Amino acid sequence: MTTTQERTPEQDLPYNVFAKACPSRGTLEHVTGRWGALTLGALHEGSLRFNELRRRVDGVSEKMLSQTLHALERDGLVHREAQPTNPPRVDYELTPLGHQVAERLLSLIHFVEGSMDDVLAARERYDTTRGGR
Amino acid sequence: MTTTQERTPEQDLPYNVFAKACPSRGTLEHVTGRWGALTLGALHEGSLRFNELRRRVDGVSEKMLSQTLHALERDGLVHREAQPTNPPRVDYELTPLGHQVAERLLSLIHFVEGSMDDVLAARERYDTTRGGR
DNA sequence: CTGCATCCTCGGCGATACTG
DNA sequence: CAGTATCGCCGAGGATGCAG
């Protein structure tokens, strides 16, 4: 198959997210996914416990957070530290790799936040031009 | 409203993705979404036509690409240029804002691609440790 | 408090067909 | 080629309940 030999100017790497079957696409989705991005972002400040995290990531359900954390832990981006105390206490923190990912993610997040005025203006223009349809 | 006054250490901005109702969260999802990220990434190299784009973003359906492009255009990240020729020709290209977003996105994408060996190793370890369950 | 498992719904998304 | 409209599936994801 020449599928990985398409027309990707900047690629010498064995992994390519633009290829459907590449495993990197799955990881990218864990990272950029709805809850993945926010979870990594929240954890970048320091380790947090499950429910602390749940508060920080406003709107996430228990199930989704749990699921997200598992995926990130499996990918080696998050470290889970369970302490056998009572009541149980579990801390989640980024691995070094996770921190590097989170940095890039936060750069994007902050940029988007800082651009919202432009985005909102663009939307208005778009909606108005098209007659609100 | 005091909703934006929670406990966000690094925030002085009016927008905060960690807040459920903040419009920035929607935009972030357009940008980091499954097809949004790849579309912006592909467009960063230069303008592309609809079906060219479809080829570059391997696996995207016509409908999803169309939908994705509309969302990004509405947010002011992509510019659509239709030429009334026959056969019809439509070019998509990033706006300046779109380029800035794409840069950050690509930084993340490339990092993830470059880390896949580590990620895959971590997965193996995770799966093995847990007895493949 | 930290986690699973189960149920159920809603909408993302692909396939197909049609228009300009 | 560049889209839009419609249908239908399947899986993401929320609500609830139970265990350690």
Image (spheres, coloured by chain):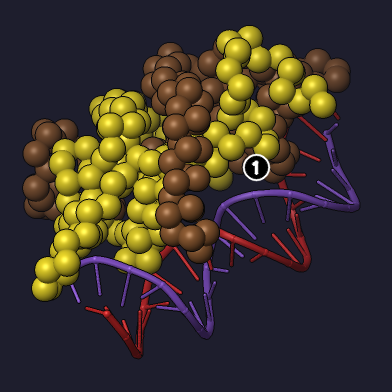
Chain colours: A yellow, B brown, C purple, D red
Residue A104, picture quadrant: top left
Residue B122 or A116: which is nearer the viewer?
A: B122
How packed mark 1 is, by other alpha carbons closer than 10 Å (few <14, some 14-19, many 20 or more), is some
Residue at x 50% of width, y 38% of height? B120
Residue at x 60% of width, y 13% of height? A12
Where does the image place residue A94, in percent across and percent down from the top left? 26, 40
Residue at x 81% of width, y 15% of height? B85
> What secondary structure is marked by label 1?
helix
Question: In the shown orientation, is residue D13 left or right of residue B65?
Answer: left
Where does the image place residue A114, in percent across and percent down from the top left? 26, 27
Residue at x 53% of width, y 23% of height? B41
Report if residue B29 is visible in the image: no
Where does the image place residue B11, in percent across and percent down from the top left? 13, 35
Q: Is residue B33 above or below residue B52?
A: below
Q: Which residue is denoted by mark 1 in the rendering?
A: B64
Residue A80 or B35: which is nearer the viewer?
A: A80
Q: Amino acid at mark 1?
A: Met
Chain ID, mark 1: B
